[in-house]
Image: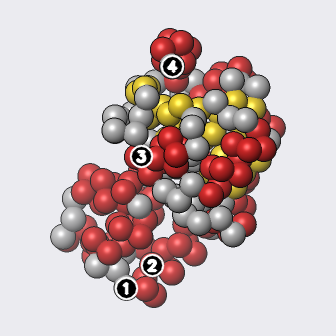
Amino acid sequence: MKLLWDFDGTLFDTYPVYVETMLEVFPHLKETFERDEILKELQVSFTYGFQYLGLSAEQEALYRRTNVALDPKRFQPFEGVEQVLKEAEVNVIMSHKEKVVIEAVLREHNLLQYFAEITTPEQGFPRKPHAEAYEYLHAKYTLDAAIGDRALDLIPAKEVGMKTIMFRGTCAASDASLAHYKDFQKVWETL
């Protein structure tokens, strides 16, 4: 199997760290927003979350600088994900996260060797749900499926003819849903 992965919320449980960092950088947000509310809005997208929280462009830039400098040890891979990576013939990543951060986190957890390529908007690709990066990766590797935790991770995969797996949720763009990586093989067999 040849798989395209999203990074945040799919390979690694990053969003709780992002919320924690948001509240460290902007403690005043605690007065208006619950932690779960911030989490929900950031999971839509960082840009959407910043707007929802009423952060200025300067505050957004400060947060992004802080976020890039986070210790890779703070991020933990989801349980069982390494076994899926080992079993796959090819793994690639398409993410909005900065490539240097993805590589540092993967290196910290000894997972970098499982990936043939990491693609981000920094390389000139449009942001998801635009399909250009997916088209590029699919043409290069003849990918079977994409795994993501949001609809915008799966919509471009459908556009280029790949199967789609929604991690920890459901959406109209998913062919299958996966609650835990220990169940990956069972879900894979249904595609």
Q: Residue at x 69, y 69 (%)?
A: 124
Which mark lies nearer to you, 3 or 2? 3
State which tag comes first along the sequence, 4 or 3: 3
Question: Mark 2: which amino acid?
Answer: Glu
The residue under label 3 is 150
Left or right position of 152 against 171: right
Question: Mark 1: which amino acid?
Answer: Ser
Q: Residue furthest left?
A: 32
- Distance (Cα) linking label 4 and label 3: 19 Å
Question: Mark 4: which amino acid?
Answer: Leu
Instruction: Work out which quarter of the rendered image holds the N terminus and state it.
Output: top right
Q: Where is residue 152 drawn, in percent x and y?
A: 44, 51
The residue under label 4 is 191
> Callout 1: helix, strand or loop?
loop
Which mark lies nearer to you, 3 or 1? 3
Q: Residue at x 53, y 72 (%)?
A: 64
Q: Where is residue 175 drawn, in percent x and y?
A: 43, 29
> Callout 2: helix, strand or loop?
helix
Question: Mark 3: which amino acid?
Answer: Arg
- Distance (Cα) linking label 4 and label 1: 44 Å
State which tag comes first along the sequence, 3 or 1: 1
As rendered, which of 75 and 168 lies closer to the eye? 168
Residue 181, labelled with which disc?
none
The answer to whether 152 is drawn above or below residue 55 in the figure is: above
The answer to whether 99 is drawn above or below residue 111 in the figure is: below
Q: Residue at x 40, y 39 (%)?
A: 173
State which tag comes first along the sequence, 3 or 2: 2
Q: Where is residue 188 drawn, in percent x and y?
A: 54, 18
Which mark lies nearer to you, 4 or 1? 4
The residue under label 2 is 60
- Distance (Cα) linking label 2 and label 4: 40 Å
